[in-house]
Image (cartoon, rainbow, N blue to C red):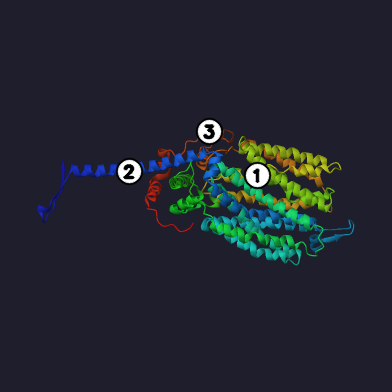
Amino acid sequence: MTDHVEDVKKPELTTHITDKDDKESTESMDVYAQEYMSKFLDISNNAKENDSKEKNMSLKEGIKTFPKAAMWSVILSSAIVMEGYDLNLINSFYTFPSFVRSFGEYYPESDRWEIPARWQTGLSMAVNCGQVLGLFIVGFVSERLGYRKTMISSLLLVTALIFIVFFAQNITMLLIGEILLGLPWGAFQAITLSYASEVCPTVLRLYLTTYVNVCWVIGQLISSAVLRGLVNSDITDSWKIPFGLQWVWPVPIAIGVYFAPESPWWLVKKGRYNEAKHSLERLLTENEHLPDKSVMSQAMVDKIKLTIKEEEAISAGVSFKDCFKKKNIRRTRISCLTWLMQNITGSAFMGYSTYFYLQAGLSTSMSFTFSIIQYVLGIIGTLVAWFTSQKLGRYDLYFNGMILQFLLLVTTGILGCFPSDATSWVLALCFWFGPITYCLVTEMPSASLRTKTVILARNCYNIAGIIIAIIMPYMLNPTAWNWKAKTGFFWAGFAFLACVWCYLDMPETKNRTFAELDHLFEKGVPARKFKSTNADIFDVDEMMGKLGDDAVRDIIESNRLENSTIEKV
């Protein structure tokens, strides 16, 4: 059959259109569709193969392939040392003679100087209040500027704010300084964890995220050691020395962060795919398992792109509000409760341990010595988690640790009913299960909402810390409720509730890639079946149905772009 289009004025120009033209057009479209499908299939298979390789990577291979990723993560995480140092410092100052005489009040009935309970509450709340605000601010700033620039800005801010607490003339000025210092501390909490989870493979994720906890404990250990060394000092304002030592860290850490590569996940979210590939090449090291890091970095970019695009298709949006939508609320709830439970099950004792030991009857110097022992045990607890994680899962470590925490808190309360120094030793053992929390809160969220979910989770921890800061001084202070070690009964009740919640709601995430976790949460797999459920990820037909033509086209076109000169990420 032949169609024709007649030119009325010039019949000789009449155009004849044959079936052959239609056929050629259809064949051309079929070829394009096949090419389109073929390219997306290649990308999907590339991502699936890379995800499988990451999942099956041994610890030895992970260390040989990602040593630089581990190094950069350690450098950023070292900022948490400052946070742990300052948080422990202010709570330990309540027993530090120079500080108490400078900012406290004299109680003739006990013939001793004390920081009043109301001011203990205010100072302990100050940093937590600043952190809550700082975390929310960093959620917006890091989304716009990235992790590196936000981190460097926060470190420079710390350098300036230390002047306020160092030159504090009264307790009100000190309170303001601690609130303001809480702003960058909050930034460090969110950025270090998100960065550690995004630059390392699954096999190293537990080690690098829980290392953040090690840094926190190291900071507390250093502050306790500094105070222990100065406790008998004759210097009038010896309390200024521990504050002044905080100027040592920010600039060296900021220099290290400047040279660190940006998170490839953040770069992909911003559509900067070539820069993400360059960042990954800086994180990888070629070896017998990885002869060409350029090939692997491209496969990793493909995987990250597909993971993020699929998340956006399922639950569009990257705001705090999106964390509470139907598709994300479960992940947000688990992250928030995981960190909340850590703080309301006896962790509060850790910050007040020196003061607790003093009220338990130990001398000032011995109180600081016991605090040092406690923090050393905290570091050992992290090492125990590293070794046991090879056989036990994340859930196993958290759940069993919570049961042990409950038993130790009950024991602390019982011993508090009788005069005994054994209370101090039991309390020192109460804090070994916490490290796994840092890994869990980064594995639960989706990639698109990871930083914001970590912020919400940490703020649950901090808000609980504010409430604890109100009641703990009254529990321990001899001029207030004077519960002393019997406070253990109070926190043991929450530890029991945490055990019940953990069993019902916390899934096992060990050896799961982020793509697999997305799949399991999307399918609504029950918590106790996470470990045994097979996750079929990057299925081409399923993904094309979810993503739609525009997203698929964007992925394909981004892979066609020629490599260009990439500025330093």
Closer to us: 236 or 27: 236
Q: Which tag, 3 or 2, sits closer to the chain's start?
A: 2
Closer to us: 385 or 15: 385
Dot 3 and dot 2 residues touching (CB under 8 Å): no
Of the residues shown, which amino acid type is indicated by label 1?
Answer: Pro
**Residue depicted at x 75% and y 47%:** 373
Write down the residue under mark 3: 533
Which residue in the rendered view is the most extreme toward the front?
288
Closer to us: 561 or 403: 561
- For residue 211, side relative to residue 38 (left or right): right
Residue 533 vertical placement versus 42 (above, below): above
Where is residue 87? Give x, y as percent.
70, 55
Closer to us: 460 or 450: 450
- Disc marking residue 272: none
Q: Which tag, 3 or 1, sits closer to the chain's start?
A: 1
Where is residue 388? Give x, y as percent.
64, 37
- For residue 358, side relative to residue 264 (left or right): right
**Residue depicted at x 74% and y 58%:** 122
Q: Which tag, 2 or 1, sits closer to the chain's start?
A: 2
Where is residue 109? Give x, y as percent.
90, 57
Of the residues shown, which amino acid type is indicated by label 2?
Answer: Glu
Write down the residue under mark 1: 435
- Disc marking residue 35: 2
Of the residues shown, which amino acid type is indicated by label 3?
Answer: Thr
